[in-house]
Amino acid sequence: MSQPNNRPGDNKSQYGNRVSGGPARPGRSFGGARGGEGPVIKPKNFSGTIRRLWSYLSKERKFLAIILIFILFDAAITLLSPYIVGVSIDAMSSRSPAAFGMLELLLIILVIAYAADGLVTFFQGWLMAGVSQRIVKDLRQALFGKLQKLPVAYFDTHTHGELMSRLANDVDNVSNSISQSVTQVMSGFIAITGSLIMMLVLSPLLTLASLITVPLVILLTRTISRKTSVLFKDQQEQLGKLNAHVEETISGIQVIKAFNHEDKVIAGFDAVNMKLCEVGVKAQIWSGFLMPIMNVINNVGFAAIALVGGILAVKNVITVGMIASFLGYSRQFVRPINDLANIFNILQSGVAGAERVFEVLDEQEEAADLPAAIVLENPKGDVVFENVSFGYRPDVPVLKNVSFESGSGSSTALVGPTGAGKTTIVNLLTRFYDVTGGRILIDGRDIREYTRDSLRKCFGIVLQDTYLFAGTVKDNIKYGKPDAADEEVEAAAAMANADVFIKRLAKQYDTMLSENGGNLSQGQRQLLAIARVILANPSILILDEATSSIDTRTELYIQDALFNIMKDRTTFIIAHRLNTIRGADMIMVIDHGEIVERGSHNFLIDKQGVYYRMFFNQFKNMEELYKT
Ligand SMILES: Nc1ncnc2c1ncn2[C@@H]1O[C@H](COP(=O)(O)OP(=O)(O)OP(=O)(O)O)[C@@H](O)[C@H]1O
């Protein structure tokens, strides 16, 4: 806690809904949160993901049915036109007046049909846009809701940028994929079936000639799509890493500048950017292969039809008009096959995106409340740790058999070297992590027997690095009690000594704060955090090195404000500067996850043990100390 600088990417939320301080803990050791290393690409379950997407699509069944009717209408018009063109050519070739009369009628029908088709296609696009947007809205909602339910440990191992990428890029991909591919897949299959039937009706022999190329088309499509599917997923992952890098860099910009790491950060970005570029180029090249190859194959197919058709026409087996119709159908038959290959690419990218979204949705949520969980009402704040053991990873124990009692209204200070386990004790008390051994009691009951919401309601937390939200000063103070009246907000601010500076702001309590209170000083942010806690009126207070790195005058203000709120509340103070906790009822010295000493300041000084040495190390001049 005492390290002076934030590490970029360390701003993971440690504390939940009652956090008055910030999620950023300077120098926190957040195990696996890495900017640049995503998960290994797993073989994806294409059909499973499609089935799962269908569960979202099926809610739009009504609209999809109407879209299907429109598609059928469009397919009928499309199938009708080559036939009419063929009949018209034959009519013109026959040069009979009756045939010319029929030609006029056919052409009028064709014009009306095309106009109607245009209208239907427009409405079909309209409906489909609504369907795809509603589905991704649901998906975004599910994903965001899920993020709120994931345990804090999840955010230790997933960067913000990576999660942002899933919420934005991957969901976008799903949306594009649905809006572009669903109608095209439906109309493609209908066009293929319809054209094939018409081709068979016109000439089975010509049909055979035109089908020669189909196996080749299917084989190539499958091969290339397999390759592109892997590349698209890789591209998405690289994009996630790029976002993570940018997000991390922006959050930690001050630290980066302070350490002159700009070039290093740019080099890191270049590497990720280059990888994304390489994967992107590969993905584009592979998906771009398809079109030219298909064109060649199609042209070979047309040549085959022209050859066989010419022979049949010479032998009077088929008319020239019917050959023209046939060519039209064969084009309609081949086009969707080619399109389907392209759509398959889009679909792959969408499915890859959906898979990444579903990965998050499938993550294990915070353990549910016990069925018999009770609401912790009017807590007294009696805290007992009974042989508590815990490790963030099963193989690395962090707390070992920790036992202590902090009576209601008492103050307990946790001191000890960095990494000793002080914050971990608080993390367990607030149930951001669950103990692996022993139990924690509040007011005589295991904290797991309370509903998590009611348990967290009893804590107020003030961190060294306070987190404020974009909104007014008033909104930020009311965060812990949204229905508070203006007078209550002002009273809390006064008690926190925050009213003096708030009254000097341009719009006082209605002044807008930028995200994380960027337009306030650190001390002012902390005073607001204290006001927030005062308003929420928790029974247990957690002060995490709340008054370090601020000027002495502001510190006095803050100390005074904290003194105000500590009265009659169980308080835990995590502190490195030992002179701030001399008045605590109990001081516990933690080292390597164990309580090595405990007692009042005077008791521990008399004992001349670890605390004594720590204390006098901080105050080398003992005479000076005794004078104070
Ligand atoms: N989220 C996490 N995942 C994995 N290990 C962690 C995590 N948080 C802390 N640790 C490890 O647990 C141990 C105790 O950490 P803790 O934050 O409780 O120490 P602390 O006494 O509060 O230290 P400081 O005074 O530096 O804040 C350390 O070894 C730390 O590396």
Image: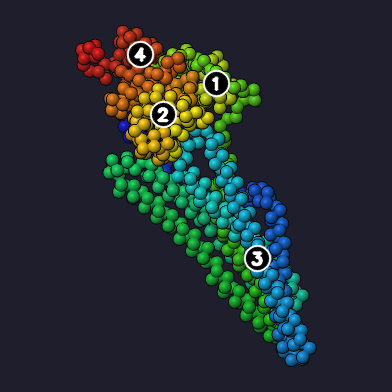
How many residues crowd mark 3 within 10 Å: few (<14), some (14–19), many (20+)?
Answer: some
Rounded to the nearest whole Å, what is the CA distance between mark 2 and mark 1?
A: 26 Å
Q: Which residue is mark 3?
A: 121
Q: Which residue is mark 2?
A: 529
Of discs 3 and 1, which sits in the foreground? 3
Of discs 2 and 1, which sits in the foreground? 2
Report helix, strand or loop for mark 1: helix
Q: Which residue is mark 4?
A: 583
- The numbered mark at residue 447 is 1
Q: Amino acid at mark 4?
A: Gly
Residue at 30%, 48% in the rendered image:
263
Instruction: State the residue in front, 441 or 40.
Output: 441
Choose the circle earlier in sequence order: 4 or 2. Answer: 2
Choose the circle earlier in sequence order: 4 or 3. Answer: 3
How many residues crowd mark 2 within 10 Å: few (<14), some (14–19), many (20+)?
Answer: many
- In-image side of 312 versus 388 (left or right): right
Instruction: State the residue in front, 424 or 390.
Output: 424
Choose the circle earlier in sequence order: 2 or 1. Answer: 1
**Quadrant in the picture for the N terminus:** top left
**Quadrant in the picture for the C terminus:** top left
Rounded to the nearest whole Å, what is the CA distance between mark 2 and mark 3?
A: 57 Å
Instruction: Judge whether residue 503 can be spotted in this image.
Output: yes
Report helix, strand or loop for mark 2: helix
Choose the circle earlier in sequence order: 3 or 1. Answer: 3
Question: Splitting the image into 4 quarters, where does residue 477 fall?
Answer: top left
Say if 443 sits above or below 498 in the image: above
* Colour scheme: rainbow
Residue 293 coordinates in the image, percent (x, y)? 55, 70
Report helix, strand or loop for mark 4: loop
- In-image side of 540 versus 182 (left or right): left
Q: Amino acid at mark 3?
A: Thr
